[in-house]
Image (cartoon, helix red, strand yellow):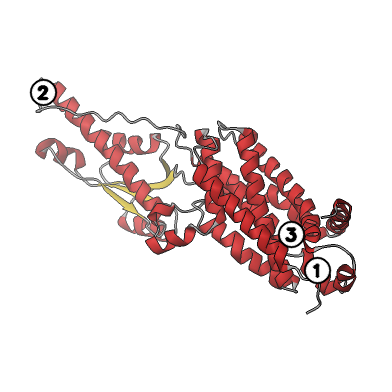
Amino acid sequence: MNLRRLLAIAYKETLQIWRDPRSLAIALLMPLMQMGLLGYGVSLDIKRVPLCVYDQENSQLSRGVVNRFTSSDWFRQVAVLQTDRDLRAAMDHGDCIAALVIPVNFSRTLYMTGQDSLQVVLDATDTNTANIATGYAQGIVAQLDADLNANWQGAHGETVRGVGTVDLASRVWFNEGLDSRNFIVPGVVAIILALVGSQLTSLTVSREWERGTMEQLISTPVTGLELMFGKLTPYFVIGLLDAVFCLGTAAFWFHVPFRGSLFTLVLTTALFALVVLGIGYLLSVRIHSQLGASQIALMLTMLPTTMLSGYTFPLDQMPQAVQAISWLVPARYYVTILRSVFLKGSSLWDMAVPVIALLIYAAVIIRAAARAFRKSLD
């Protein structure tokens, strides 16, 4: 392999990137847009659920119940309803996701019989929000029940002695605040690398076919290996710069805790970049159309990275067949590495399986890409 020829190809490809506004937009603007949209726009934390209140009693106790719901960070009161028709209209128009209904004579029934019920109506078109809001409401009502029992026992001078009590002491590791942003933002780096790397490199050789310059390229003494590394070098540098920008934004702008080794992060990022760049280059060699190569690259990298890497959906909740397919997705290993390095501070040894998987992927993809190019017009 001749270094001079390799650098000449790399220089030519760098000029091509500079002269192509589409490539520059993908390389420079895409990471900024993705970090902003996904970092701020995607969250698994459900807070301040819009709540409508239908208090049919309007007593001191019922107002206290409403205050328990609205004083927490879980619900946000948006309307006070007066009739059943108002309740139906508010839910139909999407004014609220949850509605608290307090029945008439709630206080009287509670004090006379020792029990009564509240009703929470939920809009379950978004099942995730509805399930979480149900849990919030159950927690508030459970605390209300405990406080009412304690107040009654204190007022009557009675205590209830149980057989025993068991307390649950929970301790959260790695993401102590249970902040979903710490879970989501590191995975954005994998999305950006997969998108930028595969999309840009899928145009490299197919561009030569469409512009009619393939004959000139074949007539040069450049070997297939020199062509591959020469064309991939500028994109590898761009990919690393994008990764540095995204990782720095995650740590310093979104304040995702970084507890691992910078060397481990750079090494594994370089491996994943080689994988996605190799996939894009391989498609560019095999498919002579820029549009066709870019579309297939998008299908093979972006969609699996988003859906089957564990970035969006937990893999252990998927069907067994889908979980088996996810083992073939390189981004699965990189997303695992990113979260382990950021939140757990894991070492290379701790992540031996995903690191070795990326090494194997990089070796196989680069070898296949190198062997795919033939100095022929067929």
Give coordinates of residue 143: x percent, y percent: 26, 34
Residue 159: image tag: 2
- Left-right relation of 80 to 16: left
Residue 69 falls in image quadrant = top left
Q: Which kind of residue does numbered mark 3 sit on?
A: Leu
Q: Which kind of residue does numbered mark 2 sit on?
A: Thr
- Left-right relation of 41 to 14: left
Confirm or deny contact between disc 3 and disc 1 (CB under 8 A). no
Q: Which residue is mark 1?
A: 207
Q: Which residue sits at x=64%, y=41%?
A: 267
Label 2 or label 1, whichever comes before in sequence order:
2
Whether residue 258 is situated above or below residue 309 in the rendered picture: above
**Front-most of residues 129 and 335:** 335
Q: CA distance from mark 3 to mark 1?
A: 11 Å
Q: Quadrant of the C terminus?
A: bottom right
Residue 369 falls in image quadrant = bottom right
Give coordinates of residue 118: x percent, y percent: 24, 45
Q: Which residue is mark 3?
A: 200
Count residues near mark 3 (Cα–Cα under 10 Å), then give few for <14, some for 14-19, many for 20+.
many
Tell me the element at label 1. helix
Residue 341 falls in image quadrant = top right
